[in-house]
Image (cartoon, helix red, strand yellow):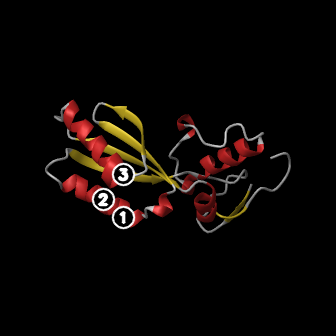
Amino acid sequence: AQGQLLCLGPVQHLKTKYLDGYTIDVFCFVNSTQGQVDHVVDGMLMHALAGSKLSERHGRFLRFDLTKASLVGLGTMFRNLEQLKKSPHFVVESYSISQCSLEQVFVKLSNQQGGGVNDSISHEEFTQEPASTLHHTDGERIGENEEIAV
């Protein structure tokens, strides 16, 4: 950031303001066919998590990225995923929702300040490390309500 303060605030505020997104991992049942998994992908993209993108697919494992999650709401996401899981038409065994990490916010801000060439975070930069595991340079753990300066 060339020695300039870019942002200041609590961890949750920084995540919401600069990278309001979630990653949703979906696991289908072991005996699921390719067609059944395709049906889950369609259901996720068209209904359960409209506006999301399929970012990974490995056999029965699916990963979706949802940006601007505040428009959908966390409660709505859980409700839609639970309906998908309980539906006999879909082969969803389990799912998880992860919020972006503070590291992803820092990378995005750095990329924007580095000339604006890459304003979005690539999939390779997603780490899914929860903010509660971040530490100060002196080893002290960063709390959820503590302010972070970038």
Q: Which residue is mark 2?
A: 80
Q: CA distance from mark 2 to mark 1?
A: 6 Å
- Mark 2 and mark 1 in contact? Answer it, CB < 8 Å: yes
Q: Position of residue 92 (x, y in %)?
A: 23, 46
Q: Is residue 82 left or right of residue 100?
A: left
| Extreme residue in the right direction | 3
Amino acid type at mark 2: Asn
Q: Is residue 140 left or right of residue 100?
A: right
Secondary structure of residue under mark 1:
helix
Q: Position of residue 34 (x, y in %)?
A: 22, 31
Q: Which residue is mark 3?
A: 96
Q: Position of residue 5 (x, y in %)?
A: 81, 56
Above or below, 58 relative to 129: above
Q: Residue at x 61, y 69 (%)?
A: 145
Q: CA distance from mark 1 to mark 3?
A: 14 Å
Q: Residues within 10 Å of mark 2 (few under 14, many from 20)?
A: some
- Mark 3 and mark 2 in contact? Answer it, CB < 8 Å: no
Q: Quadrant of residue 54?
A: top left
Q: Residue at x 26, y 58 (%)?
A: 82
Q: Which residue is mark 1?
A: 76
